[in-house]
Structure formats: structure tokens, C-alpha cells
Amino acid sequence: MRIFKGIAASEGLAKGKALVHHQASMVAEKQHILADGIAGELEKFRTALSTAKRTLEEHNVRDITKESKDILETHLMMLQDPEYIQQIEAYISTNLVCAQWAVDSVTTDMVALLEKTEDALLRERAVDFRDVSLYLIDAIKGKGSHRMENLDEDVILVADVLMPSELFAMDKTHVLGISLDGGGRASHVAILVRAFNIPTVLATGGASKTVKDGDEVIVDGTYGEVFVRPDLMVSQMLDERFELWQQYEVELHQMADLPSVTTDGHPVQLKANIQTSSEVDGIKALGACGIGLFRSEFLFMESLEHPSEQRQFEVYKQVVESMAPNPVTIRTIDIGGDKVVSGLGIDEKNPILGWRAVRFCLSRKDIFTIQLRALLRASVYGKLQIMFPMISGVEELNAVLHLLEHVKEECRTEHIPFDPNVKVGTMIEVPSAALCADILAKKVDFFSIGTNDLIQYTIAVDRGNEKIAYLYQPFHPGVLRSIKMIVEMAHQNNIPVSLCGEMASDPLCSVLLAGLGMDELSMGSQSLLQVRKILRSVSFEEAKQLADHVLGMDSYLTITTYIREWMHDRFDHITTI
């Protein structure tokens, strides 16, 4: 028996037979060509670019989480990077080599340069370029390794290296768990395995060199351990742990149809965040009482062309009809910042504080009014709610509300049916909006707190910068006090308040958020069942006492420690902590 200790990347237990995968080095044919062969190799390369783009776009439709989509969008942008493309074409023409050789050489040089930098984000881009080159070489060859794409039995994947492209392509229905020799919790593969809910352990050191195909392997993604050919005693112990985990999973799924209420009857509605219509059936099966955040920008990110009014209407209608009679809150286009869409002219030195979301929409009314028309048309097919992102004050809110009324009048003139009472809300994710919440609450039907941006703007920390990532603290007293103030202002004006940021998806935060007075929590589907179980296990009075207690603390370190201990004392399965 061998035990490999690593990094717990995605919680859960998985047991099965090993499938060992060794990442072949980027093997490309290296052939010289004659001058009259340049045109042919350039054509091969350009065809491969188109093929690779189509492959990524297919994954982009199928895979549904925001994190997955962000990674795919990064790879798509790289395939459209003019400098990368020009370097490869120049290498073919200048060195008289085949397309595969050119892709290999240019990428290898680029990766070597990026890996030398001290910037962790740029080093991560090196992995992306290596992965993109695999797509290209595969497309040029016209074939690839399909060992993991069509599995006929359940396996534990044990690999030395796994590229995001391989994870997207593999038959994930038969991959029970994953063990990787390298990697870290912030890597793209780690983000993806969590999105796909595959128990995974990273940085095992060399498990793939020891394991053989067919070996019995147990992956413990909660404690970061991989057991290879476990002996009888250990196997029995892990079997017991595995059975307990399975029982817990069954118990969670049995709660899918139960209401989300505390032990003393206080309701906290649990909704889901989605970005494609294909997610609806899954969240309904998990008991979501609505969609609290539909990210409409994915329609603009999935294609190089702007989606037409009809295309948007069809998507919104499908989601609203599928969820009826439960509500669907659709956020208007939130692009810019870290969401780059080609062809819109957004290229800024400081995009997080720049031309993004509602600021972009108000300056591109030609795009914005088309979306508003599509939303209004879809509103008659169910309970649609419209939500505006990145509102910083009453001036912006007045502007979008005025434009919405203008579009409504257009629809009346053209005899286009819509729900005249469609509810309209605003996200609160800018500190100025939080401070003016009492003013904004008088003009909308609901609030939704976007904690991802609210945290980074409140603390002035770029959540994508690894050098200061430790400062991005959801339990910072300033953040918690802002949330409490927003809730109080909303309730004083008799409107409900939801929270749709990552805090809602973290079971550790669930009781605290209920205690702060949240009417709704909207989260990734993977968290719905666990959060429901937690909220059904405590009283609202306990939750309020917890919130009042931590609001009196002066340090996020103190608050975090206290909440961890409080939750651990009451729940055995807070495995994400």
C-alpha cells in the first residue's frame, strides 16, 4: 500500500480502478519544407486555428460554470492573439518549416519567457499557451489522443499533468476522482475539477509513477490523500469513511424538495446562479426556488458577433418558461473589467475601475436597448426580473430606468406584449451604492448584493493579484458592516435583498448571512444542498446572535477564527473549511 499526501482541491471521496495518464511532451513533426510549400503550411495552420476555435466553442456551450467559461474565454482570446499568430506564420515562412514545428517552437519560446517572470499570473498564462498549442498541433495532425474521451467504465484518473483542454474533452461521467502529481488550488485544473464536482487531490509528488492501470485507488479530496492498493485494515477504514460520505450525499439529495427554513420557521430562499439555459434542469432537481442571477453576458462572450434581439429573446424565453412559476433574475450585460468581449473596443489600463457593465451600456445604447427589448418580450412567458450591475449612484440608476421606460413605450407603439409590472432591481457592489442604499431602495423593487466586487472595492484589493490575495477577506469588518447596512436600508424601504456573490456559495458563510437578514441567497448549484441542510439545522435566533457577536469584533482574523469554530462545533460536514 502507498499513501500519497497532497493538496485537497475538490472535496469528496472516490473509489475505483486506476486509469494512468502520462502527458506526452508536445510532440510535433519537425520537417523542413521548400519555398513553394509555405502557402500549404500556412493554410494548414489557419485551418487548425478555425478547428481549435470550434472545439473550444463546443466546450463553451456544454460547460456551464463561470470559472469554466472564463478559462475557455482566455484560450479563445489566445487563439485570436495577432502577435502569437503572426509569430507562427513568420516562423513557417522564414525558417521553411512545417506548421507543427512552428507552433511548437514559438510556443516553447513564449512559455520559457513567461515561466521566468516573477508575476504568478503571467506564469499561469504559460500553461494556457502550452494548452492552446496542444489544440493547434492536434488540429494540424487531424487526430489526437482519445483514451479519456470515450470511457466504458468508471475510473480514478491518475496523471502526472492534466491540461484544461484534456479535462474539458474527457468523459467526465466515468471519471470518479482525480490524482495529479502537480498543481495547486489556484490552478485552472483545480478550478475546473471543483466546477465539475470531481473529488481531486493535487501535488501528490509522483503517484502516477507508482500506480498501474487497474490498481484499486481511493481519492480523498477532503483531506488531500490518495491511497493506492490499500491493505485490508486501511481499506476497511476508508470503506467506512466512503460509506459515510455516500450517506451524507444521499441525505443532502433527499432535502432537495424541502423548504429552506430555519428550525424556528424563518425562510431564506435559495436560488441559483447560472449563465446558460442548459443549467435549468439541474438546478430544479436540486430544489432551487428560482434563478437569482442569470449572467446574460455569456451570450456576447460565446460568439464573435453580437447576439441579435431575436437570439437573446429566445434564450431568455427558454429560461423563464423552464423556471415558471419561479422567478428568474436576469442581469443586464456585465462586460468589461475581467470579462473581455472582442469587437467592443474595451481595452483599458485599469479595466476594473473603467468602462464596464452599466457604464458601457449607457454609452452603447444601441446594444443596450436591444437587450432591454429582448428582456421585455420574454417577460410575458414567466416571472422575469431585470437587474442592473455596477450602479454607483442615483444618476446612473435614473438613466437606466429612463431608458427602460423609453423601450417600454417603443414596445407599446409596436404592439409588442410585455409585462408592464416587470420587477426591476439593482446590484449593490460599489461602496458608493452601499452608502446610498436608502436612496436607491426608493427607486427599485429589490437589491442584490454582489460581494465579489463589493469586497475588492471596499478593501481596495485586486482579487486577481496573488501578491495581495490574502487581503481579500469576506469577513473583513468593513464588508460585514456594509452588508448589514444594505440589508437594513432595503428592509426599511420594504424591498427584499439577495446576495449572489461567492459568499453565498460558501457553507461557512451561510448562517452568518441569514443572521445579517438576507432574504435570499443565490449561489452555484454545487452549494445548494449543503447550504439548505445547514440553514434547516439552526434557528434564526442563533443566526442573529452570531451576526451580532461578530459585528462587534474588530479584525477579520478574529472573525474568521470565531466563525470557523462556531460552524465546526455544530456541523460535521463543513468540509470546505
Image (cartoon, rainbow, N blue to C red):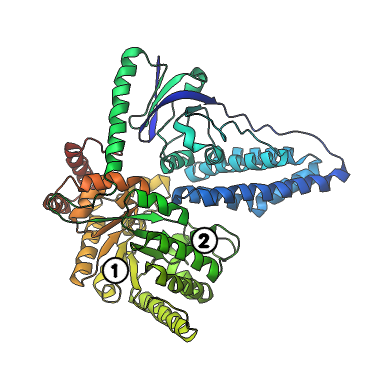
Give neighbour class at mark 2: few <14, some 14-19, many 20+ (Cα, 10 Å).
some
Quarter holding residue 92: top right
Say whether disc 2 or disc 1 marks the residue closer to the N-terminus.
2
Residue that label 2 marks: 299
Amino acid on which the number 2 mark rests in the picture: Leu
Q: Position of residue 224 (x, y in %)?
A: 36, 29
Query: Is residue 524 in view from this perspective?
Result: no
Quarter holding residue 560: top left
| 253 displayed left or right of 341 | left
Measuring 43% from the left and 79% from the top, which residue is drawn there? 403
Q: Position of residue 262 (x, y in %)?
A: 17, 51
Quadrant where the image shows the N terminus: top left
Residue that label 1 marks: 446
| 1 displayed left or right of 309 | left
| 489 displayed left or right of 164 | left
Amino acid on which the number 1 mark rests in the picture: Phe
